[in-house]
Image: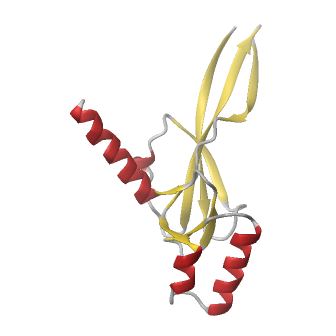
Amino acid sequence: MFSYKITYIEKRYLGHINSSEIYEVKNRMPKSVKQQDNLEGFRYFDRKIIIKDNKKYIGPYENYSSWIYFGKRCSINDLIISNAIKLLDKLFLIKVILKQNYEYACFTDAKTFVLMNYNDITFEEYINKDDNYLERRKRI
């Protein structure tokens, strides 16, 4: 018996959660993901494959990463003072954020709002976090 893992990327496109694509990648390299006009964000996950007695068993999706969104993180205060959104849209979005117990939404480069879970980040935040990590590693 032996096993191996396959890593996948899920890309979420403009519209809603159902407009996504999933495909296999060699490794998790967020910096290599290219922004496209209608791409809201992406995440990674794995699947374990076990081969035993010449039979292949495929495990469930697991080890999900946080979503990484292309866009700007917005708090409720950011939304209140923003002039970029119509008042009714703003009120609706704030109501949804509060009702669902979220703290942030992301105004994506695809011009949509996506609610952000606790660990979700923007691509810019990821790059800054990664660059800061690399800078600290250089000092060690």
> Residue at the location (72% across, 64% down)?
101
Quadrant for the C terminus, please.
Answer: top left
Instruction: Look at the image and tell me whether residue 38 can be seen.
Output: yes
Quadrant for the N terminus, please.
Answer: top right
Residue 53 x/y as whole percent: 77, 7
**Residue 6, located in which quarter of the rendered image?**
top right
> Residue at the location (39% across, 49% down)?
129
Residue 125 x/y as whole percent: 43, 56
Instruction: Look at the image and tell me whether residue 34 can be seen.
Output: no
Residue 15 x/y as whole percent: 66, 71
Q: How is the image coloured?
A: secondary structure
Please tell me whether residue 96 is drawn above or below residue 22 in the rendered image. Answer: below
In this orientation, which residue lies closer to the viewer: 126 or 136? 136
**Residue 102, located in which quarter of the rendered image?**
bottom right
> Residue at the location (63% across, 48% down)?
22
Please tell me whether residue 54 is drawn above or below residue 122 in the rendered image. Answer: above
**Residue 105, located in which quarter of the rendered image?**
bottom right
In this orientation, which residue lies closer to the viewer: 127 or 13? 127
Residue 95 x/y as whole percent: 73, 78
